[in-house]
Image: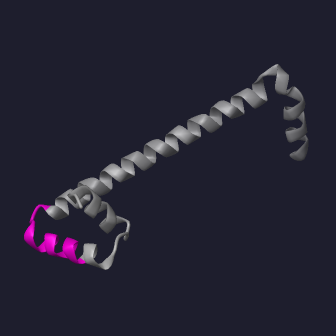
Amino acid sequence: MNEIKLIDCHIFNQGNHEDALLFDAMLLLDAGLPEKIMWQKKAHAIVQQYGRKKIKAEIEMVHQKLFNEPVHQTFKQRILRFFS
């Protein structure tokens, strides 16, 4: 198994017992591995944040269409009645 996949399994607590033991041995032998783990966690966080921003942008686009386009006025009025 490649190092990136092993780090992912470690980060997300996946994989089997043998992979976990192999990873523990790698941690003992490779002084740079903790830094690689840190960078991989940061990369995952950036990807997750990008995904959130993308979803928010898509939701906003749908919102703008539903509440601003004349074809959806009936829908808009029905929704607004819920809150009045």
Question: Which residues fall within the magenta stretch?
Answer: 21-32
Where residue 66 sits, quadrant-wise, is top right
Residue 53 located left or right of residue 75 = left
As drawn, 1 above or below 28: above
Residue 81 located left or right of residue 48 = right
Farthest residue in the top direction? 70
Where residue 38 sits, quadrant-wise, is bottom left
Picture residue at 31% right of the left edge, 53% below the top: 42
Q: Quick check: is 53 in the magenta stretch?
A: no
Placement of the N terminus among the 4 image quadrants: bottom left
Task: Judge whether residue 84 can be spotted in this image.
Answer: no
According to the image, what is the colour scheme of the structure? Answer: one colour
Depth order, front residue of 44/6? 6
The image position of residue 25, as x and y in percent, is 15, 75
Placement of the C terminus among the 4 image quadrants: top right
Picture residue at 37% right of the left edge, 47% below the top: 46
Where residue 7 sits, quadrant-wise, is bottom left
Picture residue at 58% right of the left edge, 40% below the top: 56
Picture residue at 35% right of the left edge, 70% below the top: 15
**Principal secondary structure, stretch drawn in magenta:** helix
